[in-house]
Image: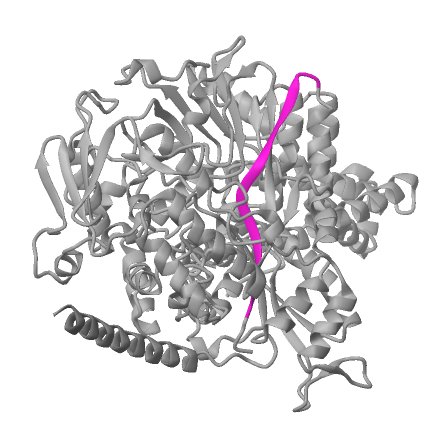
Amino acid sequence: MTSKLTVKTLALLLAALMVMASLAAVAAEEFAPGPKLGDKRVRQALLYALDRENFILAQYGSTDIAKVGLAPLSPTSWAFPDESDLNAYAYDLDKAAALLDEAGWTLGEDGYRYNADGLKLSVKWLVYEDSPWPVTLSSMAYDSWKQIGVDLVIDRMDFNTVAAMSMDPEPGEKDFDIYTMGFSLGADPDPSGGLFDYEAFTAGGFNASGYYNERSQELIKAGKTTFGTEERAAIYKEWAALMNDEVPTSIVAYRSEIWGVNDRVSGLDLGTYAEWPDVIRDVTLEGDQILKLGETSFDGKFNPIYADKVYDQWINYCVFEAPIIVNDEGEYVASSIADYELSNENKTYTFTLKEGVKFSDGEPLTTEDFYFTYTMIAHPEYTGPRLSSVMNIEGYDEYAAGTADTISGIQVVDEYTISFTFKDASPANIVEFAYGIVPKHIYDDGTMEGFLSHNMSPVGSGPLVLTDYAPNQFIMLEANESYWDPDNAVKIDGVYITIVPDESKIAALELGELDVAMPAANIDNLRAIEAIDGVHVVSYLGNGYTYMCFNTLH
Amino acid sequence: MRTYLIRRVIQIIPVFLGILLILFFLMEHAPGGPVSTMMDPKLTAEQKAILSERLDPKLPIHQKFFNWIIAAFQGNLGYSIKHRRPVTELLGDFIGPTFILSFTSLILSMLIGIPIGVLSATQQRSLADNASTVFSLVGISMPTFFFGLLLLKFFAVDLRLFPLYGMRDNLLARNATWLARQLDVAWHTVLPAVVLGLASTASFMRYTRSSMLEVIRQDYIRTARAKGLKERVTIYRHAFRNAIIPIITLLGFWIPSLLSGAVMTETIFAYPGLGKISVDAVNTRDYPVILGVNAMLSLLTLVGALVADVLYAIADPRIKYE
């Protein structure tokens, strides 16, 4: 009996292995790496021949402000590997030349390299001019790559065109060798759907490199299905080290944020993962009780399910409250308005809202509002960036197709209990609840237009209330006098945010017109703030990074 | 004159439609789209495609064109993709500040540019003339960005005479009297208006000067002088009136820019005008805003040219329209 079972198990295992092997073979067949950037040694050679430390000095003025990028995770993340395990590709032209020789690219008489088929090692880089760094980096690369025999063709355009040329075309039609772009890392390390995920190598997908690696895909999948921070950290550490070695896309630099803060402000809690209003919750001020903040621009979408600009989201975090927040370690945890439980093989999140949570107009926050917020995302006219929050929920497809009246995966149990069931279990699903809840009794008039009409005069349950707003001029946030949780209310009267051009932020700090401002991160600005009496610098590694993507099919 | 006016107004319609058609064609063929810059890896290609269809439905260009025109006649310019607000509402927010800024700078540059132009023509090759030539060369070639920051450094930071940024003191605006609020706006507008007006002051100066030089050499000016008319009357009543034609042309072209906004000036002084909004709209491919702004500006350009034509006839009776 036992032997029979073992044989059966073995047979099954063998069959499963064969299926997996054939699947891998199919995937590998699809991935036909190009002779140039498809070869890992060529990608590594290009990185060795790019003096990124010098680039940082040229662009930011100091290696204190930006650091050479190592792996596609934030160095402050719990999933970041030991730095000594990672290759920084320190500038080394000899090593770069040796790697190219090894890869079969030999120097021709004209000083450029050719392979055995007579193909010239010439690469096209899409450079946008909307911000200065890609221009600086590509010009530096032009000079140093020429020394190792690589011909760089720089194609200049605007940001939108780079995005359209790299990501939008069908996989076989992506016409570039390299493109560069800036991005910000979320608090969760899950890279699925992003730059390194082969499943995102589609028309419009984020992975434009076309790179396929079986182990990488396994790890991405494992990270998505494993629960527990420690277990996930081990997976992502291995994955980050693998990407550091394979470099289908290289992280060029991590950048710090620099704030100038007036000495009359104390208790400002800025940090990589600090969410407003936690940043200002404990702020106390000497003198005038309004904190004056300078910012460059807002889109004016003060609506948690529509905002796609970081600064709009700041306002949303102050005005609205979400069931899930990010803590200082970058982990997603329950907020003060709710608790949650995971059940049904980790697919179902059941939230219990705290009783007594009130919107600023005095009405209680209940599951009706929670449910309403998610039905607005599922609305056929919804055009915000949060679609993924409902698309992975059970029953969404039927609802979208019109065969069901409600989304079966969202169940309102009672006034304070609601459950969400996802199609697949994943620790990354929790991210979908990190957005504020809007009050149904104010926002719901049955139409999307009516819903959007509150974008500039939001009402939520947060510790601050937006009392006045003039586009491209200012935003006035005042303390919510009737905040439901008086112990965690803000201690100041309000926050007055003015639109201040980057060039004037430091002057305004000096004149005392602003208490807090974040100018562009570079050494000149840092020194200028340090030189002001009564103003100090707060600096930390931000979650913004710049990357350089190689088209591995070329 | 009346038949001419009616004919000209009717002519505007096909020209305007032609401009719109070109705009539609250009936008159809511009690389990228509003969804290209939505940077969220949580957004899969499939979701992007859904959003793209909702934001910018794939219709044949002629259908898009007619839909837009019909809606525009009903006062509906569509919904901004970036701001999720009706375009008319968005334009309404920014047109006021843009007009205040551009109008102030236009008046400023005419008040300074035209008299100095006349002066330097009548006193050709004098010290004043040479100084004005140098000034206008500097004025035309000085980059707005640099001049703006220079003024800010000197007048706002060092002397603290003018504010650093913005169009009004928003905290003051909440409880001050009406007059105090208007004065506050005026005070905030001085520096940006000077920066914006510098280049146009210089061109008003040059146009006036060269046109005046041509006119004062004419026989009828000599006749006027021979009659014993005062020099001031000769210059201002007889010569200037005839020299004004090129200035009217310049003015006609200035009308659309009263509302087009000035990106650089607005950015440096954080003046909440249309310029920055329209440039952002191009960068994010916010088609309804691009269309709304450009349609408005091309209509104004056409009207500006018409106004200039009418003014020619008023300024110079020799010009007659049939």
Decide if residue A318 is on the left or right side of residue A132: left
Q: Is residue B49 magenta?
A: no
Location of residue A24 by image quarter: bottom left
Give the residue displayed 35% in from the left and 64% down from the top: B45
Q: Quadrant of the C terminus of chain A?
A: bottom right
Asked if residue B85 is positioned above or below residue A157 in the image, the reply reads: above
Give the residue displayed 32% in from the left and 67% down from the top: B64
Location of residue A415 by image quarter: top left
Asked if residue A120 is positioned above or below residue A536 in the image, the reply reads: below
Q: Quadrant of the N terminus of chain A?
A: bottom left
- Give A15 or A407, whichever is nearer the viewer: A15
Give the percent coordinates (x, y) of residue A46.
Answer: 67, 67
Give the percent coordinates (x, y) of residue A531.
Answer: 74, 24
- Give B257 or B25, whichever is nearer the viewer: B25
Asked if residue A149 is positioned above or below residue B231 in the image, the reply reads: below
- Give A530 or B131, whichever is nearer the viewer: A530
Q: Is residue A544 magenta?
A: yes
Q: Main secondary structure of the magenta part?
A: strand
Give the percent coordinates (x, y) of residue A302.
Answer: 35, 37
Residue B109 visible? The answer is no
Instruction: Specify the segment rendered in magenta.
Output: A533-550
